Image (cartoon, rainbow, N blue to C red):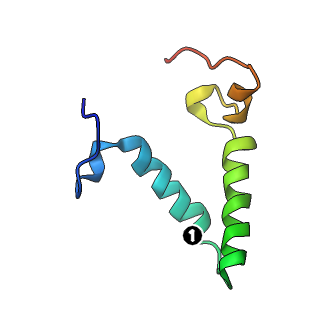
């Protein structure tokens, strides 16, 4: 396995590419940013939803914040 992503080789890290696709589809493509402060606020709202509210199937349909609160992740399937 590669320890780093090579320039121009996005497939080296599928997790990051998956996240980037979600960020673009769910945040960047759905909002108009009227100012830098507006962009910061909308990005922060999306980040909080992504990490604190929405369930992630890789960790048993729990939000990632639940792992920080001491709730263990299920073993990989």
Q: Position of residue 52 (x, y in %)?
A: 74, 42
Q: Residue furthest top?
A: 75
Q: Is residue 10 left or right of residue 46?
A: left
Q: Position of residue 66 (x, y in %)?
A: 73, 29
In the rendered picture of this protein, how many numbered marks are placed on residues?
Answer: 1
What crowding class fits label 1: few (fewer than 14 Cα within 10 Å), some (14-19), or many (20 or more)?
some
Q: Residue at x 57, y 69 (%)?
A: 28
Q: Which residue is mark 1?
A: 28
Name the foreground residue: 59 vs 43. Answer: 43
Q: Residue at x 76, y 25 (%)?
A: 69
Rendered view: 74 above or below 33? above
Indicate the quadrant where residue 57 lies: top right
| Quarter occupied by the N terminus | top left
Q: Residue at x 40, y 50 (%)?
A: 17
Q: Residue furthest bottom?
A: 34
Q: Position of residue 38 (x, y in %)?
A: 72, 76
Q: Residue at x 64, y 25 (%)?
A: 60
Q: Position of residue 45 (x, y in %)?
A: 74, 59
Rendered view: 35 above or below 47? below
Q: Is residue 24 left or right of residue 39?
A: left
Say which element carries label 1: helix
Rendered view: 18 above or below 36? above
Q: Is residue 25 left or right of residue 44?
A: left
Indicate the quadrant where residue 41 lies: bottom right
């Amino acid at each position: 396995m590669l320890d780093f992503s090579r320039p121009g080789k996005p497939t080296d890290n599928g997790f990051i590419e998956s996240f980037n696709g979600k960020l673009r589809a769910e945040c960047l493509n759905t909002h108009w940013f009227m100012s830098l402060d507006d962009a910061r606020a909308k990005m922060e709202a999306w980040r909080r939803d992504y990490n604190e509210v929405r369930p992630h199937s890789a960790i048993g349909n729990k939000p990632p914040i639940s792992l920080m609160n001491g709730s263990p992740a299920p073993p990989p399937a």
